[in-house]
């Protein structure tokens, strides 16, 4: 009894093969349709190009050593209050990367480059310079930032080498390279401005402390800190690549080298997908037809 039960439960591969063979034209039709559909989609899709720029942290501003170390030992927490950089350069790198990914920095870039119509070109009329949707459906800077950060810009850092890679994926290969390079330039300019502002604020604080103390040793230490701040401000003013130095500048990709769609891959996948769907269709259709055959008998 058990052997008969197991025999009834087993799939008759020969019967399955005959069923698929009898419906081979259906399977072939699925293969042709899927191949044609994927090929059409591959050639109709807007190609996306990738531009990549590689940068390396410019390094610390040299605010340590010698006389400064003695000054910091004498002043204790005063250096921290004044904003003097006594830590590692890694924190500065992470701050710069956070600024690069920040919403304020990105939204300013989108606004000044007038990218909203480009990011949402499907609902923008170039002839009238107006949106084709109601005001409530028009994209905002917040949505543009989310779209840009998720779909266009990617920032990665190699922890071993310290190299930072910025990639831009965009349908215009020239604009992709332009945006990648400009983002690095804007980031350096932003961090320079912040460093100058910080140095000036620190110098103001130190100058105030210098006037309020009569101790010669403390005055000498404060003067050293002021000298450090002067050097930092001068460095920020004269250094274009303040936070990151460009190792490999972004260049436009070749016109025939988009990252997607992968036309050849999609064309090769068409027959496999069509064959799978065709076989699945035959098996499902056969499963629904079987009860009818049994009922008619």
Image (cartoon, rainbow, N blue to C red):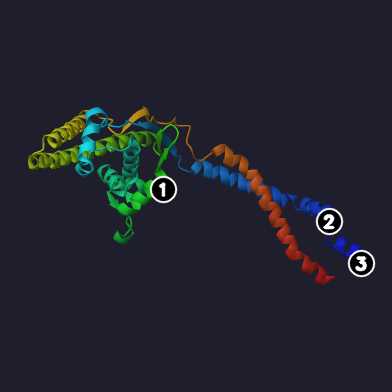
| Residues at circles 1 and 2 in contact by the CB criterion of under 8 Å | no
- Of mark 3 and mark 1, the one earlier in the sequence is 3
**Considering the numbered disc 2 on the image, is that residue within a helix, a strand or a loop?**
loop
Q: Is residue 290 left or right of residue 216?
A: right
Which percent across, then down, holds residue 249? 37, 29
Q: 238 or 234, which is in the foreground? A: 234
Whether 201 is drawn above or below 238: the answer is below
Image quarter of residue 157: top left
**Considering the numbered disc 3 on the image, is that residue within a helix, a strand or a loop?**
loop
Which percent across, then down, holds residue 216? 11, 34
Which percent across, then down, holds residue 255? 44, 31
* Placement of the N terminus among the 4 image quadrants: bottom right
Let me know if residue 170 appears in the view: no
Task: Tell me how far mark 3 sits from mark 1, CA to CA.
Answer: 62 Å
Image quarter of residue 91: top left
* Placement of the C terminus among the 4 image quadrants: bottom right
Q: Residues within 10 Å of mark 3 (few under 14, many from 20)?
A: few
Mark 2 highlights which residue? 12
Residue 68's tag is none
Q: Residues within 10 Å of mark 2 (few under 14, many from 20)?
A: few
Residue 1's tag is 3
Whether 16 is drawn above or below 253: the answer is below
Which percent across, then down, holds residue 39? 56, 42
Q: 68 or 268, which is in the foreground? A: 68
Question: What residue appears at the point 28 percent right and 35 percent down from the top-left corner?
Answer: 188
Q: Is residue 232 left or right of residue 156?
A: left
- Of mark 1 and mark 2, the one earlier in the sequence is 2
Residue 150's tag is 1
- Of mark 3 and mark 2, the one earlier in the sequence is 3
């Amino acid at each position: 009894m058990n052997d008969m039960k197991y025999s009834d439960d087993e799939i008759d591969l020969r019967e399955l093969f005959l069923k698929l063979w009898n419906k081979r034209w259906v399977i072939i039709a699925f293969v042709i349709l899927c191949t044609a559909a994927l090929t059409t989609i591959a050639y109709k899709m807007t190609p996306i190009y990738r531009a990549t720029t590689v940068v390396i942290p410019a390094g610390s501003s040299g605010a340590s050593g010698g006389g400064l170390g003695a000054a910091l030992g004498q002043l204790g927490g005063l250096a921290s209050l004044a904003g003097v950089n006594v830590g590692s350069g890694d924190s500065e790198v992470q701050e710069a990367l956070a600024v690069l990914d920040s919403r304020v920095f990105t939204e300013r870039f989108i606004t000044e480059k007038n990218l909203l119509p480009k990011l949402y070109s499907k609902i923008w009329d170039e002839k009238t310079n107006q949106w084709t949707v109601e005001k409530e459906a028009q994209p905002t800077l917040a949505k543009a930032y989310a779209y840009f950060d998720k779909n266009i810009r990617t920032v990665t850092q190699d922890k071993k080498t310290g190299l930072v890679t910025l990639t831009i994926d965009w349908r215009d290969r020239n604009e992709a390279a332009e945006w990648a390079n400009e983002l690095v330039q804007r980031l350096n300019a932003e961090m320079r401005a912040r460093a100058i502002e910080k140095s000036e604020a620190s110098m103001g604080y130190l100058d105030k402390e210098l006037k309020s103390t009569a101790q010669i040793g403390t005055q000498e230490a404060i003067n050293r800190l002021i000298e450090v701040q002067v050097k930092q401000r001068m460095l920020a003013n004269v250094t274009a690549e303040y936070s990151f130095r460009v190792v490999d500048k972004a260049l436009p990709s070749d016109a025939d080298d988009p990252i997607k769609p992968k036309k050849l891959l999609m064309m090769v996948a068409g027959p496999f997908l069509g064959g799978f769907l065709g076989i699945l269709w035959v098996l499902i259709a056969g499963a629904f037809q079987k009860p009818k055959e049994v009922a008619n008998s």
